[in-house]
Image (tube, helix red, strand yellow):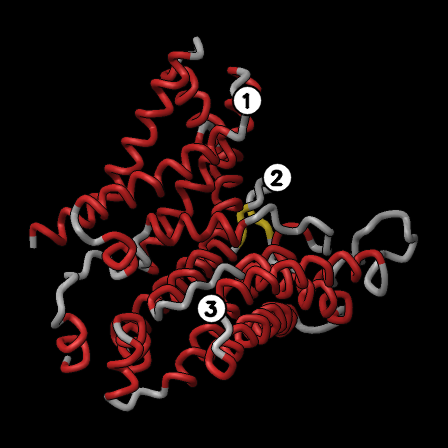
Amino acid sequence: MSRRLAAALRPAAAIGCALAAMAIALALLGASPLAVAADLADGAFGNWIAFTDTLARATPLVFCGLAVAVAFHGALWNIGADGQLVVGALAAGALGPALAGAPHTLAIVAIIGAGGLAGALWGGLAGWLRARRNVNEVISTIMLNFIAAQLLSWAVHGPLMEPSGAFPASRKIAAAARLHLYFAPTRLNLAMLFAVALAAVCELGLFRTVPGFELRALGRNRRASAFFGLPIARLTVGAMALSGALAGCGGAVQISAITHRLYETISPGWGYEAIAVALVARLSPLGVVPAALLFGALDNGSQAMQRADGVPAQLVYVVQALVIIVMLAFDAAAGGGWRELLEGGAPDRPDATAETCDA
């Protein structure tokens, strides 16, 4: 129990150590750490609009964080959530203008479903390459990220470009396919609740269903899973497809709720940032929600911090990197390293796999 408690407290301790290190650096540079922290917090939560903007920035991180967490539970290193989000957005942006006149609920289901399906195909392709051709998924997902970015660039400069041809952007999606915004001029919308509900579904699926158990067993030991008759290839492809679908839904939601059209830079790197989100959450789907909110607050507050204190907004990326480094250092000191981090503090002992398979 004490070991599990220590593992649960490590993210908070890592965040505290990272912030302490940055406070020392700011003090050495002549800035007031307290003033910088106050301005960062004010920019993220200082008023209703700032708070809802933080929620809007955190929402795609929840979708991508869930995608990363699901894949990592199966020891599948999905570095392609960004590309999967992009193809999900691309599918949603292509379908959206054609949904004029459709019932609102049906249009929303169609546009999010299209994004999820596109992401699933993109992630499933990497899973198929891993299962059937033994292609390392780190390499394939990174390469697919570049392909997705180029497909988006081609689309907004070509077949999906808005009619005037003046800007590299697509036409706006139909009004029926847009998630409503509430309390204008804020960006509050139902996508945020959808992301939280999806996190709860992933939590139940991973820890309360047979496929979830099989995926976690695969992550513990691929050889033992094969010995006990688990369908390794099917699990690999299915996990990567599900991971891609989650990220693809994030891209579709961004189109439906926020931008309403495709842009060449639809993602500022959410898929990569989501890796840090998932690791801070220790791969807990429910833990992804507060972790994404933390990173969304850092992103949103960084602009106010830069305006008020002259501190570069890129400082938040340094904090994010320090959090991961400190977490890894804590896990290595505890004797677990990457294995313990990815298994949420699971004991690293020879009979761990056997206990998993006997459960």
Q: Residue furthest top?
A: 30
Q: CA distance from mark 1 to mark 3?
A: 35 Å
Residue designated by label 2: 185
10 Å crowding of disc 1: few (<14), some (14-19), many (20+) = some
Name which quarter of the figure residue 320 lies in.
Answer: top left
Q: Is residue 298 visible?
A: yes
Residue designated by label 1: 306
The disc at residue 243 is 3
Mark 3 or mark 2: whose residue is earlier in sequence: 2
Q: Amino acid at mark 3?
A: Ser
Q: What element does badge 2 sit on?
A: loop
Q: Amino acid at mark 1?
A: Gln
Q: Can you say whether 97 is above or below 319 in the image?
A: below
10 Å crowding of disc 2: few (<14), some (14-19), many (20+) = few
Mark 1 or mark 3: whose residue is earlier in sequence: 3
Q: Amino acid at mark 2?
A: Pro
Q: Count how many numbered circles sit on residues in the image.
A: 3
Q: What element does badge 1 sit on?
A: helix
